Image: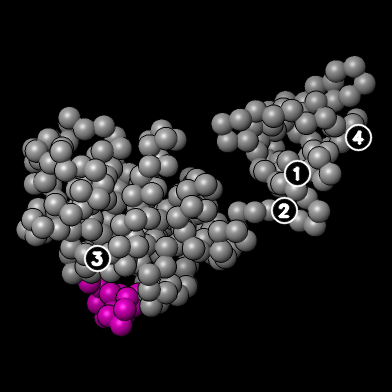
């Protein structure tokens, strides 16, 4: 069990904000932390890792990492951290990057085989693709068999195909090593595929704590689907109005009547839903 009760005053573009997170996380959980930019997600991970100071208490599997009297340094917390920028040693081979964390050659061999990197073990990082670098970073984070693995949007720079491949690698390693994993992500499909719990932050506070299905599926009543996007344009054609909405990487058209068209403004976040195969638009 992780018991977390922390506070920290943050400075952002909109002024000061109080990060205030109080939650308990079960051992072996895979928790996704989501929320808008500037909501405190990365700072929350860095406080758990001991990379930033905070007030409060952090107790991990019966051991106090943070209290009123002490704060354990990062190297004594026994965790793994996977960053967005890989953070590999450029002058070390793939295998040497892993062995720098732990001299266990058998474990390094096993991890490289699991992630299909064994044939690249002698390569330097600058000879690797982004996906390969991220797999090396993930393997290195697991070299000390950490009880807690923290990941800050580890796949954000990768193309969709590679993201899906690495998501499976992450899930395989999470299960095999029995870690408790906390991952910051903005990708709904990634969250749904990997996590068993979603904690959503807004302005430093937890506003939603639920299963991925409860957090991500927004349908109500007889709605068949519900998707959130940005309203790009509204224009009249003949006797109807058409709304253009961006949903992820897709652009869709929704037919509106005149009253509906006047109730929306370009740039708004909107929800596209359907009942009996008739799409409708509503404000988020």
Determine crowd level at label 4: few under 14, some 14-19, many 20+ residues with C-alpha closer than 10 A: few
Q: Nearer the viewer, residue 168 or 94?
A: 168
Residue 130, given in percent of the width and then of the height, sits at 29, 35
In-image side of 278 versus 150 (left or right): right
In-image side of 242 versus 86 (left or right): right
Q: Earlier in the sequence, mark 4 or mark 1?
A: 4
Q: Earlier in the sequence, mark 3 or mark 2?
A: 3
Residue 98, given in percent of the width and then of the height, sits at 14, 51
Q: Earlier in the sequence, mark 4 or mark 2?
A: 2
Residue 262 is at least partly visible in this image: no
Residue 93, given in percent of the width and then of the height, sits at 10, 40
Q: CA distance from mark 4 to mark 2?
A: 24 Å
Q: Tag 4, which secondary structure? A: helix
> Which image quadrant for residue 103?
bottom left
Q: Which residue is mark 4?
A: 259
Q: Which residue is mark 1?
A: 273
Q: Tag 3, which secondary structure? A: loop
Q: Is residue 134 magenta?
A: no
Q: Earlier in the sequence, mark 3 or mark 4?
A: 3
In-image side of 144 versus 22 (left or right): left
Q: Is there CB contact under 8 Å for labels 3 and 4?
A: no
Residue 129, given in percent of the width and then of the height, sits at 26, 32
Q: Is residue 219 above or below residue 165?
A: below
Q: Tag 2, which secondary structure? A: loop
Residue lying farthest to the top in this orientation: 238
At 48% from the left edge and 67% from the top edge, which residue is drawn? 20
Residue 3 is at least partly visible in this image: yes
Q: Is there CB contact under 8 Å for labels 1 and 2?
A: yes
Q: Which residue is mark 3?
A: 146
Q: Is there CB contact under 8 Å for labels 4 and 1?
A: no
Which is in the foreground here, disc 3 or disc 4? 3
Q: Which residue is mark 2?
A: 219
């Amino acid at each position: 069990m992780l018991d977390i009760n922390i506070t920290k005053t943050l400075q952002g573009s909109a002024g000061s904000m109080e990060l205030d997170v109080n939650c308990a996380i079960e051992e072996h959980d895979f928790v996704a932390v989501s929320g808008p930019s500037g909501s405190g997600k990365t700072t929350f991970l860095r406080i758990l890792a001991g990379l930033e100071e905070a007030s409060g208490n952090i107790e991990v599997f019966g051991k106090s990492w943070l209290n009123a009297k002490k704060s354990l340094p990062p190297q004594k917390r026994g965790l793994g951290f996977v960053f967005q920028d890989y953070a590999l040693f450029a002058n070390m081979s793939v295998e040497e990057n892993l062995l720098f964390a732990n001299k266990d050659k058998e474990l390094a061999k096993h991890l490289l085989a699991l992630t299909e990197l064994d044939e690249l073990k002698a390569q330097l990082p600058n000879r690797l693709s982004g996906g390969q670098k991220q797999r090396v970073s993930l393997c290195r984070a697991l070299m000390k068999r950490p009880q807690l693995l923290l990941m800050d949007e580890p796949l954000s720079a990768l193309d969709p195909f590679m993201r899906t491949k690495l998501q499976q690698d992450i899930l395989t390693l999470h299960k095999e090593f029995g870690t408790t994993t906390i991952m910051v992500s903005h990708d709904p499909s990634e969250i749904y595929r990997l996590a068993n719990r979603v904690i959503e932050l807004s302005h430093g506070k937890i506003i939603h704590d639920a299963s991925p299905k409860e957090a991500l599926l927004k349908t109500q009543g007889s709605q068949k689907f519900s998707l959130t996007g940005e309203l790009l344009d509204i224009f009249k054609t003949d006797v109807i109005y058409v709304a253009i909405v961006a949903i992820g990487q897709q652009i869709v058209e929704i037919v509106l009547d005149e009253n509906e068209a006047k109730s929306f403004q370009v740039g708004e976040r909107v929800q596209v839903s359907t009942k009996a195969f008739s799409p409708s638009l509503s404000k988020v």
